[in-house]
Image: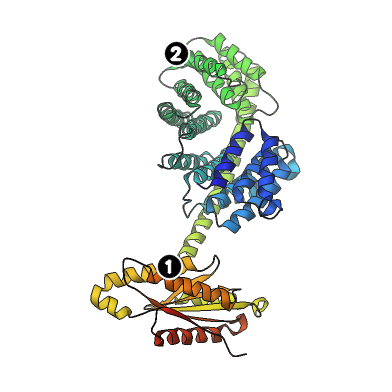
Amino acid sequence: MDDVTLRALHLLEEAQAGGAAQVLAAAESALREPTGEIRDGPAAMHFARVVALTRLGDLRAAIVAADLMLAAAEREGGAGWRSCALSLRATRRLRLGDQDIADYDVAAVLRDLVSAESALLPAEPDPVIAGNAHTGIAIGYAQLRLYELAAPQFQAAYEATCRASYPDNGNRAMWLCNLAELNLMWTLELYQVGQVAEAEKHTTAAEEYAVRAATEASGPKAQVWRLSALLYAACARADRQDPAGAAADIPRYIARLRAHGVDPRQQEMLLCQPFHAVALSRSGRPDEALRVIEEAIAALSPDSDWLICAALHRTHAVLLSRNGSRDAVPGLTYGDALAELLWRQRHRWLHAAVSMQSYDVLRWQHEQAERAAQLDALTGVANRRGLDNFLQNLATPAATDEPVAVLVVDLDRFKHINDSLGHATGDDVLRAVAQVLTASVRRGDFVARLGGDEFVAILPGADSGAAEQIARRTVAAVAGMTAWRAKVSVGVASGPACRLGETLTQADRAMYAAKRAGGNRASCRHPAP
């Protein structure tokens, strides 16, 4: 992990701990360092800025900041940061839509979440960035109640924490707790639509994840994660094998979490109350069950999660009905009908998201196949087909007067290497030369293998002086390889993009001139004026 990413992650922790205003100032200062403009800063710092703006309640500014983060990620070629930017924008759009119906756009949110998922098809190498990316997608899907899509993302985030390079900060238990919580939320909705057997499958899964989280809890907040996990495990037992034990354990773990500063009005705590009431009811304590659920309803706030609100009120109605109250029946009937409509809506969103995913995967597979067809299998640089496509894209009308330099690189006495050391060694030498050339050129330059032992590098915007420096650097780097006594001849030419074919010819002639002069050198030519 680089220093900028590490600094940004520290800022994220500060923002989430209540220092959002200070984090916003620090992030914006860091973003201005490269050019003085916020937009030109690194994606990692844009991430911190989005989170800080969100914590400060400015969702519109956070969405604009996510757009800037996306542009920065595109510049940097960072798949993980691109995914984070898309999921951040999606979840902020969701929250904004909750506040103002005019901004409610589930289709745009789904498009961002699916695109964020597709961005991770080429795996993100940094496990911390990968973990944040998968978590962002999971949170977005969970907010839409697309549990089937959220669960694999939380699982992928957990797996990122299992990599050796991941810091021991407690995230492993956190994501297992997220999986337990997700399954409990799924359970509540399944009960509301009458799918009891399916609901019990998810309480079983919730308990398994919670037990693992309690075992794997580590880092500075290990005890809090352990207690949260044990609380979720107790909730998962309420409707199955141990209602009496759950009835005793749920309030005990809530009390211990409160002692650690956890607010009982938080969503995670309110989520447990329907399970507590069910456990009491199944243990033959109906009056206590009613008291628990009524206290939980009284603790609800206007911004409480609607699904938890619905679960609390439905549980209350069910308990009243079991106690013989006829007044609860109409409300229960209405609530169940509404729950069924919302369940159908959820499935429509799920179908839309899965269709988008399928399209994106097919498109990515096509792009991968097309990319593979343009790569040289031995060296990993472009092949002649890739070169032809690059040259075609380079020779646009807008770029006809732009300078372009060309390097043609050929190994000296390569046949001797093959004959004396074997073709396997010859292949190793070709791979090494490709790596040297790729490392010698600038970012944005293009390297291809023309065939045999000949390579070409295209340097858009480079003049002859810069190209000659790169050529000499390449010659010296190949000669300095210690594993083999290999040398190259490099031909250099430059000219306008509109005469690129002539420049290639001149570079090829310059390469042969370098060979005639004894090899292990660079020779430069320019097209005739």
Q: How is the image coloured?
A: rainbow
The residue carrying pointer 2 sits among few (fewer than 14), some (14 to 19) or many (20 or more) residues within 10 Å by Cα, namely some
Q: Amino acid at mark 1?
A: Val
Give the alpha-carbon distance from disc 2 to disc 1, as whole Å: 69 Å
- Can you tell which of label 2 and label 1 is closer to the viewer? 1
Front residue (pair 12, 306): 12
**Vertical side of 188 occupied by 358: above or below:** below
- Crowd around label 1: few <14 · some 14–19 · many ≥20 (10 Å): some
Q: Position of residue 407 (x, y in %)?
A: 49, 78
Instruction: Return the x and y of residue 63 as percentages of the image width and height.
Output: 69, 46
* Residue beneath the point at 46% across and 24% down: 226
Q: Check disc 1 and report the residue beneath it.
A: 436
Residue sitting farthest toward the bottom: 528
Residue 200: name its quadrant.
top left
Q: Is residue 28 among the parts visible in the rendering?
A: yes
Please state which amino acid type lies under the numbered disc 2: Ala
**Residue, disc 2:** 244
**Residue at the spot 33% in from the left edge and 80% down from the top edge:** 413
Q: Is residue 447 above or below residue 283?
A: below
Task: Left or right? Give the position of 514 relative to 422.
Answer: right
